[in-house]
Amino acid sequence: IETLPHMDFYSSPSDIGDSLDELTCPVCLELYKKPTTLPCGHSFCYVCINECWESRKDHVDCFCPSCREVYTQKPKLKVNMIIVNLVEKAKKREVGLGVEARDAKHGGVDVKMGVKSGGNESDCALCNRKATKRCVPCEILCCVQHLKLHRQKGHRLVQPGVKIEELRCNEHGKPIQLYCKDDGSLVCSMCRGGQHQDHNVVAVEIAHAELKVSKSVQKKKVILHTREKLEQQMESLRQANSKLQTAFLELEANSFLQVCFIVNVVRNSVINTKVIKEIYVFVPQPCLVSADGQTPSLDPNSAHPKIKISQDLRMATRTRTKQPYPEHPDRFDFYVQVLSSESFSSGHHYWEVNVSLSRWWGIGICLNSMGRKGEAKDSGLGGNPESWCLQKYTKQYSAWHNYQGTLLSLPGDPERVGFLLDCEEGELTCFGDSRVLHVFRGNFMDPVKPDIGVYNDDDDDDDDGSVGDSLLFCSF
């Protein structure tokens, strides 16, 4: 049972005011009528607590409006005769001393005169400390120290800048402490006896608690629905993958049309789902798939002087000796890189590069506006907003864009890396031995070119004419 104050005949007016506060139902804010005490120790009017629970018919559990303790079974309610007797004695003493006894003090806290609601004062009404809250029923500002008693009394507290007038009923001028569920409006105690007499009205605190419970239940429903939807998508993907496996095993030739079919099916069924991160694609090797069926060719005008290009314009080999290339504005003069002659701005394109003969490389795509001169990072693949690339360095693989790198985990060293470019979707999917390694996203409607960089950490000062690492565009 809640601890109740002892009241004797000689209690002061302020003591009686405190006692009446202790004998007030937190739901209807009036003296207890048929008080009943819950197992948690909090008391309510018999009618109030039943109306509170009946208003939550959609919920099985009952709860205490004061401490929010939940009861899986509805407690048996009995009238608390001790509280009944105390209420009767309090009523007699209130009549004997006058109703002004209850208003002499606000919950045992003296009110400093001259403090107006919504005023410019920012200090506590009882001291010179900075106020942190405003007590609505007492209409005063309180510091942290003097706020404790108001919290114990269950007074409504708001921010210091809130005007008390805004928290009062426009019609009756009484504090707004109730919520009408039928109208969805905030009301005072006098409104409850007027136009809201037959409506479902509860305390503001109870309405707030029910709203939190309702939001929590709704959130759980959304999570369950989302989980079921994802499980259905995963099952569909598993079935699609199984069909793909069967289709791949039935392929008998390495024609361009067969390979294009595989890439399109993979892209439409798997890559674009945003759900599965890895999928093994059994593309016949060696191969190249692009929108027009052509192998990208290397552009000699962009090649760094230490890159030697094969006669078929598909292999780039790093050399110690500079090649006799003429000056050209598109030529890289610091990073050992070369671009392809082709550029893409629409459709789907797929190409592969044989990396088995290179120890340190960078491969990807770039806008034609990417820098070509000097050692500034804006001319290195992946070191600027105009390029996207995979990189291998000291047996570590990473994905780079705008000088931001993502470390990749590979079980071994792939012999080939592949790139699937979807210009409309703005996606560049990177493969390593037919396994998805990374997906870049960007604006690929502007023309982009495949690019490769052949790097190593050998001594470049020894111009002995020897050759080093090589990268090869694959073809049929």
Image: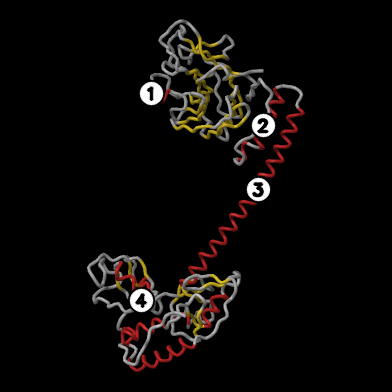
View extreme (left): residue:
128
Q: Which residue is mark 4?
A: 137
**In front of the other: 84 or 449:** 84
**On residue 264, which mark appears?**
2
Image depth: mark 3 or mark 2 in front: 3
Badge 1 or badge 2: first in the primary sequence: 2
* First reached walking from the N terminus: tag 1 or tag 3: 3
Amino acid type assigned to the residue bearing label 3 in the image: Glu
Judge by depth and name the residue closer to the eye, 395 or 92.
Answer: 395
Q: CA distance from mark 4 to mark 3?
A: 53 Å
Label 4 CA crowd tier, 10 Å (few <14, some 14–19, many 20+): some
Secondary structure under tag 3 reads helix
Which quadrant is the C terminus positioned in?
A: top right
Residue 432 position, x and y percent, is: 59, 27
Residue at x-position 72% and y-position 37%: 242
Alpha carbons under labels 1 and 3: distance apart:
48 Å
Earlier in the chain: of badge 4 and badge 3, it is 4
Q: Nearer the viewer, mark 1 or mark 2?
A: 1
Between the C-alphas of marks 1 and 2, the distance is 39 Å
Q: Amino acid at mark 4?
A: Pro
Residue toward you, 34 or 330? 34
Of tags 4 and 3, the one toward the viewer is 3
What is the spatial separation of the Cα atoms under label 4 and label 1, in whole angstroms?
Answer: 68 Å
Q: Residues within 10 Å of mark 2 (few under 14, many from 20)?
A: few
Which mark is drawn over residue 376?
Answer: 1
Residue under label 3: 231
x and y percentages locating residue 44 in the rendered image:
49, 80
Of the numbered discs 4 and 2, the one sitting upstream in the chain is 4
Q: Is residue 399 above or below residue 53?
A: above
